[in-house]
Image (cartoon, coloured by chain):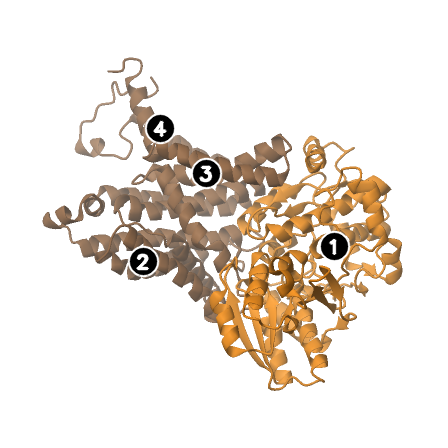
Amino acid sequence: MKTILTSLALGAALTGGPALADLTFPSLSYRTGPYAANGMQFADGYADYFALINARDGGIGGEMINMPECETAYNTEQGVECYESTKNAGDGALIYQPLSTGITYQLIPKLAADGIPMHTLGYGRTSVSDGDVFKWIFNYPATYWDGASVAIKYLLEENGGDLSGKKIALLYHNSAYGKEPIRTLTELSGMHGFEFSQIAVDHPGQEQKSQWLQIRRDRPDYVIMWGWGVMNQVAIQEAANIRYPMDQIIGSWWAGSEVDVLPAGDGADGYKALNFHAVGDDFELYDALEEYVWSQGLGAGGGEYAGSVIYNRGIYAAMIAVEAARKAQEIHGVSAIDAAQMRDGLEQLEMTEEKMAELGLAGFGPTFSASCRNHGGSGRVAINQWNAGDQTWSVLTDYIQSDQELIARLVEEDSTAYAQENGIPPQCE
Amino acid sequence: MLYREAGDFKTSYRADSQTFPIRLDRWAYYATLAAAVLIVPLVINDYWLNAIFLPVLIYGIAALGLNILVGYCGQLSLGTGGFMAVGAYSCYKLMTAFPDINIAIHVVISGLVTAAVGMLFGLPSLRIKGFYLAVATLAAQFFLVWLFNRVPWFYNYSASGQINAPERTLLGVPITGAGTQAWATYLFCLAFLVASAWICRNLTRGAIGRKWMAIRDMDIAAEIIGVNPLRAKLSAFGVSSFFVGIAGALFFAVYLGAVEVGEAFGINKSFLILFMIIIGGLGSILGSFLGAAFMVLLPVLLKNVLVGGFGWPTVLAAHLEVMIVGGLIVFFLIVEPHGLAQLWRVTKEKLRLWPFPH
């Protein structure tokens, strides 16, 4: 079934013609390589939402969605090839969501030069939330630094507001992605007086014996984990092996899906992770997906991953793209928008409770509104916990607000440095 | 028929030992070069540049470098990725420390820095050889990647550990950064490739190249006839690393623009470039180019045919690609273990005798 859909989509992309190629949202997916287990779920969610909009609503404002897919294998060189081969597909790509920090760094200058927006939903370079410098890039609803700040806030709450003397270790993927929270956590350790240590795991992360030996020796009170793909599974299994208490580990939102915890079985019970959207399939939208997509055989993975954390994130990413396109159509009064108009839609996007309820996703994510300066959303993040008994994630807290003052200062520092290095004038004056 | 030698007489030693002794070959070379310099820049677009030309040119330089070491001097090395990283990081440090100096000079200096590092890691080659040396250079690979990940000075203390190429120009034309033009970056890398090939060709057919080859063929015999193994091996490591470093600098600054060391210069890169020279042909300049082109173009071609042409799902195509590329490598090694260059050499021999073979 996937074959049929993809061949249809690609056939449309190839044969072109004004009747078929309309709003083009390329999907840079990875269904192979060390991160495939996660990449597949995201790509399925992303594709299914567009399939639903096409099948149920006849596209966005009457314009059908065209989604050429390109396999990157999470590799930057292939990502560049994919970007170049899809940017002129149809009437030109409207938005990129590459789901890879490495590819994001690669594309930030290229997209700005080509005038195509990119939305890095909770990943990529954190300081792109400063819209003053990064005109074309968006990363709402929350950034890595929000995530790190919320993790510490949660721990503060657990410990009666005092973390002094506690030991917190960061176990991170030794790449740009994994290093992102270090700066924030270092600042926070100074503010709250906890001892902060960093333990790196090299790509792809299958080998972690020595790191967990170190954790067993140091016995940190909490472990914050910034992992992705196979690294998460191994880490959780290793933690279970050394009997490290699961409820003292907090994963980032990329280390908090079913595929990460299932291999460890009952050992993973109580594992916590950050998240900025809801889990499960208890939403009206899923009934529509069943009716128009999966039962029709249009589902990218036959609905296999429906309701999983990363699948939901794919849905979320696609939903933002669609809503931004709608907003752009509304602002500019045309249905066949171009990339520059799409950017305006992203910049003036506002997600409210009512809007999400209307889409059949009531309470799915935090509310936020973007602006010229704010491309990073509200920075509110919740904590989830894994229940190994019934194999579900449950939401442990409400959305917690990150330390906005600190984050704003750090973002300002980083984006100003970038602007100076690259000679970018501020755009929001 | 294609390769007539009739009437192509050599009357001097100079004419006899030129790079392309057959007139038709020479013309083909000049025609290719002219097309590459005069025609391609006019028609090149972003897709052709970034998906095909830049990787082929840059990997071509890296393969040339490795071919000097492995193909000509017989010193097996698995440290290519690490040495490319040295080139990339020295280029980054130079670009940020001396923004006013033009980028071509930075690239060349990066090559020199890499040559020094390469010679340092080449020192064990004096005592060990073959697979043992391969393991020693493998250590260089892992050590260098670890070093660039570990020491914040190398990435200017940036929050993410990524290095980004700021805009740098040559004669007022941007070569790195976002505002580059396809023709400019293409010509910049092409110039480096042509110069590298010219230097390599002349080094390998001169005294120094003969010393390398003597060491490769039998090091003890070479020592007896007066080749200094220390100088020969270290010069091979130095020259090889110089070109690998230049390739690394171009790979980072011109092609990708942003690099994460573990991902871009991991062990896979070392293997990839080793495959290139094995498939292309060990000890052959042309082989380096053919190998680089083969390894870069085949996946892109397969992707375009399977996904673009037949409309197959990307995941199926991606898996098939791995199988087909792997299968072809095995096939080539069985059918022609001396690589594509040898295939071309044999074809040429046959064409020269056609239609009257012995």
Where in the figure is residue B322, as x and y percent of width and height?
A: 51, 40
Q: Amino acid at mark 3?
A: Gly
**Judging from the image, what is the letter of the chain drawn in orange?**
A
Q: CA distance from mark 2 to mark 3?
A: 26 Å
What element does badge 4 sit on?
helix
Q: Are marks 2 and 3 in contact (CB under 8 Å)?
A: no
Q: Amino acid at mark 2?
A: Ala
Q: Residues within 10 Å of mark 2 (few under 14, many from 20)?
A: many
Which quadrant holds residue B27? top left
Which quadrant holds residue A242? bottom right
Q: Are marks 2 and 1 in contact (CB under 8 Å)?
A: no
- State the residue in front, A109 or A375: A375
Name the residue: 36% across, 32% down.
B334
Indicate which label's residue lies in the foreground, 4 or 2.
Answer: 2
Where in the figure is residue A42, as x and y percent of width and height?
A: 68, 51
Indicate which label's residue lies in the foreground, 3 or 4.
Answer: 3
Q: CA distance from mark 4 to mark 1?
A: 61 Å
**Judging from the image, what is the letter of the chain drawn in brown?**
B
Q: Name the quarter where the N terminus of chain A is drawn.
A: top right
What element does badge 2 sit on?
helix
Which mark, residue B326? Answer: 3
Mark 1 and mark 3, same subunit?
Answer: no
Which quadrant holds residue A310? bottom right
- State the residue in front, A316 or A224: A224
Mark 3 and mark 4, same subunit?
Answer: yes
Subunit of label 3: B
Residue under numbered circle 2: B136
Q: Residues within 10 Å of mark 4 (few under 14, many from 20)?
A: few
Which mark, residue A312? Answer: 1
Mark 4 and mark 1, same subunit?
Answer: no
Q: CA distance from mark 1 to mark 3?
A: 36 Å
Q: Are marks 3 and 4 in contact (CB under 8 Å)?
A: no
